[in-house]
Image: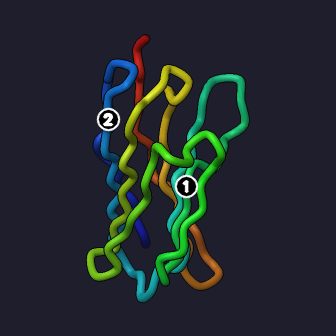
């Protein structure tokens, strides 16, 4: 069984920064894509940033230039550095990882950006 544990969320003022981390544990031989999503009330869960095992990245337009996703394959971790945060970045951030034909989600970490 694979488990994901996210950390790093919190309350920050607009313009501030947060760094989210997600650690995968369990029976994973090789993680492929690692992705961060954001969930806000009344809206669909949206992809924020993703990174492949080889290091290729993609970002939502709202995240480009402000967020940076990175991963450590040896530790099975993925991080999301979020700078210049805006109130609209508020939400629950969830990590999702893929391996073979499988994927799993973390429980999420709350990010609140005050104006």
Q: Residue furthest bottom?
A: 29
If the image is split into quadrants, where does the N terminus sit? bottom left
Counting from the top left corner in percent of width and height, residue 28 is at 42, 81
Q: Is residue 100 visible?
A: yes
The residues bearing labels 1 and 2 have C-alpha atoms spaced at a distance of: 16 Å
Q: Nearer the viewer, residue 6 or 87?
A: 87
Q: Residue furthest top?
A: 115
Q: Nearer the viewer, residue 27 or 47?
A: 47
102 lies above or below 57:
below
**Identity of the residue drawn at 50% across and 67% down:** 34
Counting from the top left corner in percent of width and height, residue 41 is at 63, 23
88 lies above or below 106:
above
Residue to which mark 2 is pinned: 17
Left or right: 20, with 107 as reference point: left
**Identity of the residue drawn at 59% across and 36% down:** 39
Counting from the top left corner in percent of width and height, residue 42 is at 71, 23
Marks counted in the figure total 2
If the image is split into quadrants, where does the C terminus sit? top left
Q: Residue furthest front?
A: 65
97 lies above or below 114:
below
> Coloring scheme of the render?
rainbow
State the SS at label 1: strand
Residue 113: assigned label? none
Left or right: 40, with 10 as reference point: right
State the SS at label 2: loop
Left or right: 111, with 62 as reference point: left
**Identity of the residue drawn at 32% across and 28% down:** 16
Residue to which mark 1 is pinned: 49
- First in residue order: circle 1 vs circle 2: 2
Q: Quadrant of residue 10?
A: top left
**Identity of the residue drawn at 46% across and 53% down:** 106
């Amino acid at each position: 069984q694979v488990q994901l544990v996210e950390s790093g969320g919190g309350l920050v003022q607009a313009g501030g920064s947060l760094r989210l981390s997600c650690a995968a544990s369990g029976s994973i031989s090789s993680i492929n894509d690692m992705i961060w999503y954001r969930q806000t009330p009344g809206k669909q869960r949206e992809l924020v940033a993703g990174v492949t095992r080889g290091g290729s990245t993609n970002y939502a337009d709202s995240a480009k230039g402000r967020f940076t996703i990175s991963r450590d394959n040896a530790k099975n971790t993925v991080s999301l550095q979020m700078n210049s945060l805006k109130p609209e970045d508020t939400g629950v951030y969830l990590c999702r990882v893929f391996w073979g034909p499988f994927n799993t989600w973390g429980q999420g970490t709350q990010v609140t950006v005050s104006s």
